[in-house]
Image (cartoon, rainbow, N blue to C red):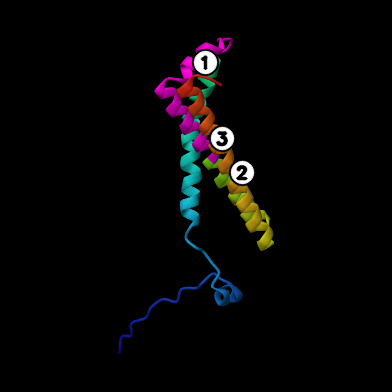
């Protein structure tokens, strides 16, 4: 008896059109998925800290809030909260746009506008935090 080496046939789960066009997994989904999970996990303690800090400063005068914002720990945590929030928002909106807008020119334009608006809002927030924390003025 001759023994043949037989490799098992692996079925490819792509349509013939997908194979011709070369469409399929770009292998970028895993990194995006992990980034969403990491930012959401980071937002839990940051948001809890922010809520507790706000509750602790209810009724405080403006000067007390400015003094609190001038603390390096407060500034770092506020910057982390803002940057993580906007990054998480960007990741989520990107998925929504990619999943529900099918016309390529509209999808591309939507992604570019969303990215620009997200970046500008994040930048405005960072500038506000730094201005308040470093100069003490609103």
One can see residue 102 in this view: no
Instruction: Say whether disc 3 or disc 1 marks the residue closer to the N-terminus.
Output: 1
Q: Nearer the viewer, residue 136 or 11?
A: 136
Circles 3 and 2: CB atoms closer than 8 Å:
no
Q: Which residue is tagged 1?
A: 65
Residue at x 51%, y 33% (from the top left corner): 126
CA separation in Å, label 3 and label 1:
19 Å
Residue at x 49%, y 37% (from the top left corner): 84
**Quarter in which the N terminus is drawn:** bottom left
CA separation in Å, label 3 and label 2:
10 Å
Residue 66 versus residue 47 in the image, above or below: above
Circles 1 and 2: CB atoms closer than 8 Å:
no
One can see residue 19 in this view: yes
Q: Which residue is tagged 2?
A: 117
Q: Which residue is tagged 3?
A: 124
Instruction: Say whether disc 1 or disc 2 marks the residue closer to the N-terminus.
Output: 1
Q: Is residue 17 magenta?
A: no
Instruction: Say whether disc 3 or disc 2 marks the residue closer to the N-terminus.
Output: 2
Q: Which residues are magenta?
A: 58-86
């Amino acid at each position: 008896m001759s023994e043949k080496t037989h490799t098992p046939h692996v079925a490819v789960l792509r349509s013939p059109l997908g194979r011709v066009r070369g469409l399929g997994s770009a292998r970028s989904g895993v990194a995006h998925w992990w980034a969403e999970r990491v930012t959401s996990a980071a937002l839990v303690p940051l948001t809890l800290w922010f809520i507790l800090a706000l509750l602790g400063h209810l009724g405080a005068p403006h000067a007390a809030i400015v003094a609190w914002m001038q603390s390096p720990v407060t500034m770092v945590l506020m910057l982390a909260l803002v940057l993580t929030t906007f990054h998480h928002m960007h990741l989520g909106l990107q998925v929504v746009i990619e999943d529900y807008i099918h016309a390529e020119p509209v999808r591309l334009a939507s992604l570019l506008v969303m990215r620009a608006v997200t970046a500008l809002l994040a930048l405005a927030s960072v500038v506000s935090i730094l201005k308040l924390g470093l100069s003490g003025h609103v």
